[in-house]
Image (tube, rainbow, N blue to C red):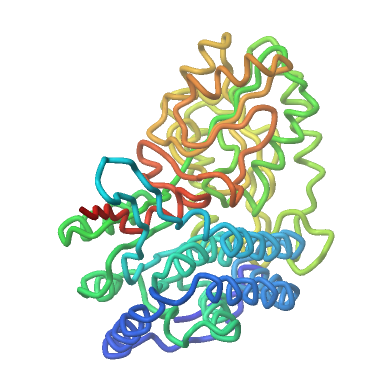
């Protein structure tokens, strides 16, 4: 497995694949440890999770640098990712006792209640775009619930996977309760098929989700899928356009636009589309593109050159169908997988920018006739991960977000993001199940009914 710098194109490191025998050994070891871990006092688990959070913070700079080197994340955003990982660890360390508490139900018997017990080993198949957060947001609740966990991370962030493994052990968790397996996607089934693996969680593409869900379904193993998104942001006629332009720029360009919940389709009321477009150009053109290790950089390179080529192909096909490029749109010369902040206007049905997920720093502006038309366009998608609406009438925005937008997470007057205290996930081809909050922890629990006569 080779890790290549998206900034320079040079090889960073090479890693040996986990052999089939090592995969089996890791699963058996995790199973043995989980049998004891499931009965470990919750207060002891919390102490270890708090220690893990502290280790993350202590290694903040090294981890941010590693992400910058492996997948091009600007170092300031990498530091913020580490901080968020520590937050989710502390959230579950502090809230697990409440989430996992028995729930009594009066049935007229001597005792009847709901108990929350772990499932066993959870296999996680995770992407490269948030190489720490995507893993730890699943790992913290899984371990606190009494499960064991195995990770198959994206091959280009193997260094991050190994770093997480080492920090978990350093925190004091039993060595092997969590293990990072260095595997290509073609070998996921080796772990998934093992009878000791109880369930799987995947964050990634629609195709990857279908493959894992199909395999797991045949084995009657539970899955949670967080897949792609093409988040609509509705800018209504009464929106604060400065706020909307700033929020849409942040939502589109954070992590170089390589986020499932990025602001991808900007649906703007016809009466303000020209003014909004001008403001968006001003804000997005101010984002500095450069070396992800530089604190001044706001947009680093894309994670791989093949991903940049795919993005440029989507832009070219959209332009060939009538879209206009009003900012960016050209592949720069030189080393690395850099791509500039780009804005497409006049985007209509039939174009790649309208129907496909655009995974990079490209904003697509779609004109709507009115509120009803904006909602129709927003929901005219196979995806349903996140959405946002901008309006000075907050009650109007909340009504649209709550009752009309087909998405798992909806924001009013802000860009979509996740919070450990709130459930996160999608509908339609964006997946099923939820991560984070008490609901995320419950996804990998046996919700057990106990009746005593």
Tally of numbered discs: 0
Above/below status of 9 relative to 119:
below
The outermost residue toward the left is 218
Percent of width and height locating residue 268? 63, 20
**Residue 341 placed where, x, y %?**
69, 45
Quadrant housing residue 367: top right
Instruction: Identify the image quadrant of residue 182.
Output: bottom left
Q: Is residue 321 left or right of residue 43?
A: left
Q: Where is residue 2 shown, x and y percent of the image?
A: 49, 80
Query: Relative to the observer, which residue lies in front, 116 or 236?
Result: 116
Q: Is residue 204 something one can see in this rendering?
A: no
Q: Is residue 374 left or right of residue 389?
A: left
Residue 397 at least partly seen: yes
The residue under the point 69% across, 18% down is 394
Between 306 and 254, which is closer to the camera in this rendering?
Answer: 254
Residue 152 lies left or right of residue 135; in this view the side is left
- From this view, report whether residue 223 is shown above or below residue 159: above
Q: Quadrant of the N terminus?
A: bottom left
Residue under the image location 36 percent in, 49 percent down: 206
Seen at 40% across and 66% down, the residue is 124
Above or below, 80 relative to 327: below
Residue 292 position, x and y percent, is 73, 65
From the viewer's side, name the closer residue of 421 and 387: 421
């Amino acid at each position: 497995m080779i890790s290549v710098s998206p900034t320079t194109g040079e090889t960073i490191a090479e890693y040996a694949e986990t052999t089939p025998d090592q995969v089996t050994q890791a699963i058996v070891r995790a199973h043995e440890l989980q049998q004891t871990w499931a009965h470990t006092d919750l207060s002891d688990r919390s102490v270890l999770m708090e220690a893990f959070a502290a280790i993350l913070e202590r290694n903040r700079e090294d981890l941010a640098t590693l992400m910058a080197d492996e997948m091009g994340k600007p170092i300031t955003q990498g530091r913020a990712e580490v901080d968020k990982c520590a937050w989710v660890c502390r959230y579950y360390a502090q809230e697990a006792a409440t989430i996992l508490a028995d729930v009594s139900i009066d049935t007229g018997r001597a005792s009847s209640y709901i108990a929350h017990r772990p499932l066993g080993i959870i296999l996680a198949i995770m992407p490269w775009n948030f190489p720490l957060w995507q893993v730890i947001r699943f790992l913290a609740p899984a371990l606190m619930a009494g499960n064991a966990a195995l990770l198959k991370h994206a091959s280009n962030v193997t260094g991050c996977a190994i770093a997480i493994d080492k920090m978990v052990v350093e925190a004091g968790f039993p060595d092997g309760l969590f293990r990072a397996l260095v595997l290509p996607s073609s070998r996921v089934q080796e772990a998934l098929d093992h009878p000791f693996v109880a369930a799987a969680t995947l964050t990634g593409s629609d195709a990857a989700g279908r493959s894992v869900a199909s395999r797991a379904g045949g084995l009657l193993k539970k899955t949670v899928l967080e897949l792609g998104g093409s988040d609509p942001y509705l800018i209504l006629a009464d929106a604060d356009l400065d706020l909307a332009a700033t929020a849409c720029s942040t939502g589109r360009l954070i992590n170089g636009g390589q986020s499932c919940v990025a602001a991808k389709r900007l649906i703007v009321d016809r009466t303000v589309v020209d003014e909004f477009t001008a403001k968006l150009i001003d804000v997005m053109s101010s984002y500095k593109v450069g070396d992800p290790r530089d604190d001044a950089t706001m947009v680093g390179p894309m994670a791989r050159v093949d991903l940049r080529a795919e993005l440029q192909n989507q832009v070219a096909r959209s332009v060939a169908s009538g879209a206009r490029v009003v900012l960016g749109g050209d592949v720069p010369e030189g080393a690395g997988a850099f791509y500039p902040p780009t804005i497409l206007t006049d985007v209509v049905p039939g174009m790649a920018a309208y129907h496909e997920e655009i995974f990079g720093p490209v904003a697509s502006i779609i004109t709507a006739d009115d509120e009803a038309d904006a909602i129709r366009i927003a929901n005219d998608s196979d995806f349903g991960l996140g959405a946002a609406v901008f309006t000075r009438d907050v009650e109007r925005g909340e009504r649209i977000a709550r009752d009309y937008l087909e998405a798992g997470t909806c924001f009013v007057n802000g860009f979509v993001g996740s919070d450990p205290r709130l459930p996160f996930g999608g509908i339609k081809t964006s997946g099923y199940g939820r991560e984070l909050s008490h609901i995320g922890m419950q996804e990998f629990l046996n919700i057990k009914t106990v009746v005593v006569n």
